[in-house]
């Protein structure tokens, strides 16, 4: 199986690539800074292809996803960033735009629980802090998910709780529509990456939004 990873910043992309290679998958990734992956050593020759480009540019996106069986969108912005961002929705629009030039791909999108009903239900103080730093990210994630719902892509949206370091732990999945936010809902990046790769392997949860949480 060949995977494509769209990735700009954050540690999630690194973890996904590392685990995919350890599962004997071949990986192509589109990054802004190739040097950010110099510490990742492929287990076999030619199993990792690193391309430099813009994940919002269809011409760059097609280069990395044209032969992929699945595409993982792990593009993100730093907590402190220029506002408002449209990076997420423009990345997904680029994938939609080139879909006709690829084989059938499973498109997995990293997102967060801080949108839609959860965003509205946050305690007032928490919501004010969240909106101050990430209102534009939440807005754009909601736009991105609307694009997906109106497309024909076989997608899965991973609505992740707060990400932390740590090892792979037992986890469960719940539908985002029935998810209730909890301060206990933190999860390691390794667990989320493991979950994503399992979903791709089994081609499960198509056209669904799901929340992975550690099983306590």
Image: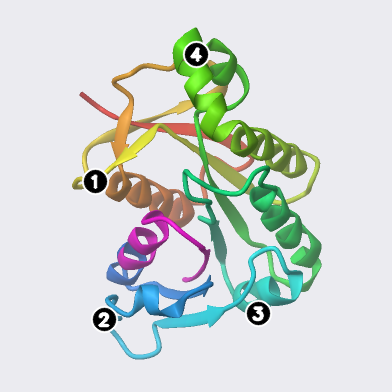
Q: Describe the element under mark 3 as helix, strand or loop.
A: helix
| Sequence-first disc among 2 and 4 | 2
Depth-wise, is mark 4 or mark 3 nearer the camera? 4
- Near mark 3 (Cα within 10 A), the count class, few <14, some 14-19 or many ≥20, is some
Binning the other alpha carbons within 10 Å of mark 1 as few (below 14), some (14 to 19) or many (20 upward) gives few
Which image quadrant for residue 140? top right
Indicate the position of residue 3 as horizontal and vertical percent values: 49, 68
> Which residue in the structure is indicated by mark 4?
122
What is the spatial separation of the Cα atoms under label 2 and label 3, in whole angstroms?
A: 23 Å
Answer with left or right where residue 67 lies relative to residue 197.
Answer: right
Q: Determine the CA span between mark 2 and mark 4.
A: 44 Å
Residue 154 visible in the picture:
no
* Residue 202 coordinates in the image, percent (x, y): 45, 51
Give how far across and how far down residue 85 sits, in percent: 66, 46
Mark 1 vs mark 2: which is more N-terminal? 2
Mark 4 secondary-structure assignment: loop
Give the residue pinned by disc 2: 43
Nearest to the observer: residue 53 or residue 170: 53
Find the residue positioned furthest to the bottom: 45
* Residue found 77% across the figure and 67% down from its top: 98
> What's the magenta region?
1-18
Residue 62 drawn above or below residue 201? below
Residue wearing tag 3: 63
Q: Which of marks 2 and 4 is in front?
A: 4
Q: Is residue 121 magenta?
A: no
Can I make out residue 100 in this image? yes
Spatial CA distance of label 1 from label 2 is 23 Å
On residue 165, the disc is 1
Percent x, y of residue 129? 48, 23
Q: Seen in the image, is 172 located left or right of residue 71? A: left
> Is there a contact, CB below 8 Å, between mark 1 and mark 4?
no
């Amino acid at each position: 199986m060949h995977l494509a990873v769209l990735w700009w910043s954050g540690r999630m992309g690194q973890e996904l690539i590392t685990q995919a290679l350890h599962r004997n998958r071949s990986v192509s990734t589109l990054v802004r800074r190739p040097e950010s992956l110099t510490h990742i050593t492929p287990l076999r020759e030619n199993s990792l292809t690193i391309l430099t480009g813009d994940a919002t540019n269809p011409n760059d996106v097609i280069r990395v996803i044209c032969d992929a069986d699945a595409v993982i969108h792990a593009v993100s912005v730093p907590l402190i960033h220029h506002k408002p961002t449209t990076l997420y929705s423009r990345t997904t629009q680029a994938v939609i735009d080139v879909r006709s030039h690829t084989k059938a791909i499973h498109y997995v999108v990293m997102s967060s629980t801080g949108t839609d009903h959860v965003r509205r239900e946050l305690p007032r103080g928490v919501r004010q802090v969240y909106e101050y730093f990430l209102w534009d990210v939440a807005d754009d994630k909601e736009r991105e998910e609307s694009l997906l719902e109106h497309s024909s892509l076989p997608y899965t949206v991973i609505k992740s709780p707060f990400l932390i370091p740590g090892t792979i732990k037992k986890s469960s999945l719940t539908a985002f529509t029935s998810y209730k936010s909890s301060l206990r809902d933190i999860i390691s990046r390794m667990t989320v990456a493991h979950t994503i790769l399992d979903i791709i392997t089994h081609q499960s949860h198509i056209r669904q939004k799901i929340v992975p949480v550690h099983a306590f």
